[in-house]
Image (spheres, grey):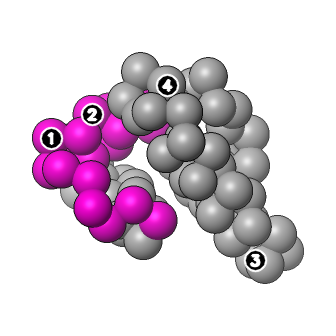
């Protein structure tokens, strides 16, 4: 993951779940990288199951709702 990709994904995570620990943010960043999410447009294809290794179910749903809304706003 490049520094730009890391900054992008860290920003996207922090905007929605700022209270996450740094370790959990790191794990979520790695998860996003492993599934191939590189842009906000990619976020519309993420499913809850993709995030459950890093987040609790409600956290995953919050993140997905926010990211999918952001994808709609960008179109």
Residue 52 numbered mark, or none: 4
74 sits left or right of 66 in the view:
right
Q: CA distance from mark 2 to mark 3?
A: 26 Å
Q: CA distance from mark 2 to mark 1?
A: 6 Å
Q: Which residue is mark 3?
A: 74
Query: Depth-wise, is mark 2 or mark 3 nearer the camera?
Result: 2
Within-10-Å neighbours for mark 3: few <14, some 14–19, many 20+: few
Q: Earlier in the sequence, mark 2 or mark 3?
A: 2
**In this view, which residue lies farthest toward the front?**
58
The crowd level at tag 1 (other Cα within 10 Å; few <14, some 14-19, many 20+) is few
Q: Which residue is painted at 67% across and 37% down in the image?
A: 46
Magenta residues (range): 16-33
- Residue behind mark 2: 27
Residue at position x 49%, y 45% from top? 59
Contact check, label 1 and label 4, Cβ < 8 Å: no
Magenta stretch holds residue 21: yes
Q: Where does the image place residue 50, in percent across and percent down from the top left?
A: 57, 25
The mark that comes first in sequence, 1 or 4, is 1
Q: Are marks 2 and 1 in contact (CB under 8 Å)?
A: yes
**Around disc 4, counting alpha carbons within 10 Å, would you say few (fewer than 14), some (14 to 19), or many (20 or more)?**
some
Residue 68 seen in render: yes
* Left or right position of 13 against 66: left
- Cα separation, mark 1 vs mark 4, equals 15 Å
Residue 65 disc label = none
Q: Regarding mark 3 in the picture, which secondary structure is present there?
A: helix
Q: Mark 1 or mark 3, which has the lower sequence index?
A: 1
Q: Which mark is residue 23?
A: 1
């Amino acid at each position: 993951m490049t520094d730009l990709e890391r900054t992008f994904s860290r920003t996207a995570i922090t905007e929605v779940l700022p209270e996450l620990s740094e370790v959990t943010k790191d794990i979520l960043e790695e998860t996003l990288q492993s599934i191939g999410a590189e842009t906000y447009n990619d976020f519309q294809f993420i499913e809850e199951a993709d995030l459950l290794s890093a987040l609790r179910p409600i956290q995953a749903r919050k993140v997905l709702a926010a990211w999918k809304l952001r994808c709609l706003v960008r179109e």
